[in-house]
Image: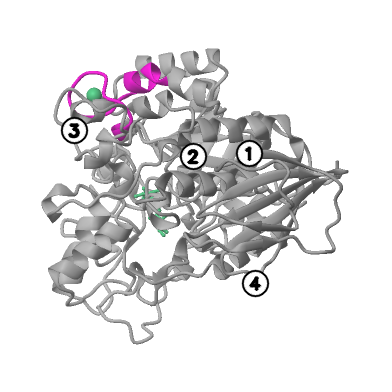
Amino acid sequence: MKETLKRTWWKEAVVYQVYPRSFYDSNGDGIGDLRGVIQKLDYLKELGIDVIWLNPVYKSPNDDNGYDISDYYDIMDEFGTLADWEELLLKAHEKGIKIIMDLVVNHTSDEHPWFIESRSSRDSAKRDYYIWMDPKDGKEPNNWASFFSPSVWEWDEATGQYYLHLFSKKQPDLNWKNPEVRREVYKMMKWWLDKGIDGFRMDVINALAKAEGFPDAPTDGKKGRYVFCPSLYFNQPGIHEYLKEMNREVLSKYDIMTVGETGGVTPEEALLYVGEDRDELNMVFQFEHMEIDAGPSGKWETVPWKLTDFKRIMSKWQLSLQGKGWNSLYLNNHDQPRMVSRFGNDKEFRVESAKMLATLLHTLQGTPYIYQGEEIGMTNVRFRSIEEYNDIEIHNFYNIALNELGLDEKEVMEAIYLKGRDNARTPMQWDDSPNAGFTTGKPWLGVNPNYKEINVAAALKDSNSIFYYYKKLIQLRKENLVIVYGDYRPILEEDENIYSYIRTLDDDRILVILNFFDRTPEFRLPEDIAYDSAELLISNYNVDPAEDLRSIKLRPYEARVYRIR
Ligand code: ISL
Ligand code: CA
């Protein structure tokens, strides 16, 4: 194997993301909880995953479902107790499953004692824990738009200043320039690591440093008073000093994995976070492929995407990081629509297309992240009215779109059906009993009505299910180092229907063929790729073993992986 590629457990692992609120409710209050996760560990073991990423479980008033933390050292009431959490970690470890926690340190809740003290007066000892500014010309210090409200600035009447919040006004941003803040964060991280956790997923970690001087964002003729400008929020000078310090003080002392959520990074910027010689993070979640269907006005405007563009983005990331850093591989999470609805076909080819996309995720170079329910092909949801939605981002968009951007109700709801975060947050569909077996009570968010057909119990009974296909893919990665570490080389790059590539490790070679649509294109293996024999490793259709690889008529969403010699 190439010397540049150090073998590590987290490169060979498959991660499964649990959004605890929607995973399994053990006590009938309608909210998923930690005991619910404990009860489903055997299910995850059966699937074969190695690591669970737990979305935030800390104490929180739940303005943003746990991403607004009021106590980093305790568990949210709805999810259980610290003792439940300890039991979850112990039982998971007994089964050989690691757990990584969400680290949310760009902001806290406004109900965190630090913020309560910070806002109590201008000379509070903790005033500088957060970002406070005087008004400019009687208004906000600048025109930055927040993710979840019009402005990033919230006026505090009592002390006569604004505080900054990139997300909701109940999520004030911490001031990372303050060394005391950093020390507190590192102390907290060590506290969890010393309990034995296996790493962190780091929320909006590239936003810790903000643009110096908080300059106005360019308006570029955009509508609305405030401008959303990721290039001023993310990847700003100072960020790498913080992460290097965090690595030195905390991360380097443990055998753990880290994955930073980094919106708006290019591969070149990503390498500054994950380069193997950088001593910062192991992986980042990049968003370029998630933005492929975003229109000029942002994610809520969905435009058609082309496979050639998708391939170009994926290949760029594969080739740029190869031998230098490590990719994370995902097509959905708790903030994104369901992958089968977005990139596949959630109607007549739901099963085939879910398997095809899974094949992509598990055969690229990088660590795959499965989002709960993906392994049974769960789909987007369409609730009839805005009241049925819970997500703060959806409600904020709804209000701005109707009141400021002048969209009509129907247009707004269609945008929410395509991109709303609640698509991914409907309860896990365990069986065909009421509420999909998620809860005996009333679920906090409606269950997708398709649960009678799409559920875990049905998947486990069907040897041809998406679930068993995932299980096999995970197994294949474990048995074939070439799938984990092999070099990536795209072929047929200009093909509008087929995504195909070759992975090579020493003299081992894997050929991946993916038909991305319901059309039936012909796959032609380029002449310069010589081979004597081909062994089919996995496919989502029955395949004639004698079929000639030089020319294959592909069926809708067909996926095949061959070892060629
Ligand atoms: O860039 C995005 C979509 O294309 C955003 O979803 C971006 O990833 C995001 O808003 C940051 O998300 C994270 O931090 C938020 C929280 O609401 C999300 O759930 C979390 O994943 C604030 O903590
Ligand atoms: Ca519960």
- Where is mark 1, residue-wise? 538
In space, the residues marked 3 and 2 are separated at their CA atoms by 23 Å
Q: CA distance from mark 4 to mark 3?
A: 46 Å
Rendered view: 232 above or below 163: below
Answer with mark 2 or mark 4, whichever residue precedes in sequence. 2
User: What residue sits 53% from the left and 58% below the top?
Assistant: 516
Closer to the eye: label 1 or 2: 1
In this view, the residue in front, 512 or 116, is 512
Amino acid type, residue under disc 4 in the picture: Glu
Name the residue tied to disc 4. Answer: 494
Q: Earlier in the sequence, mark 1 or mark 2?
A: 2
The residue singled out by tag 3 in the image is 443
According to the image, label 2 marks what residue?
370
Q: Marks 2 and 4, how far apart in space? A: 28 Å
Q: Main secondary structure of the magenta part?
A: loop
Q: Quadrant of residue 401?
A: bottom left
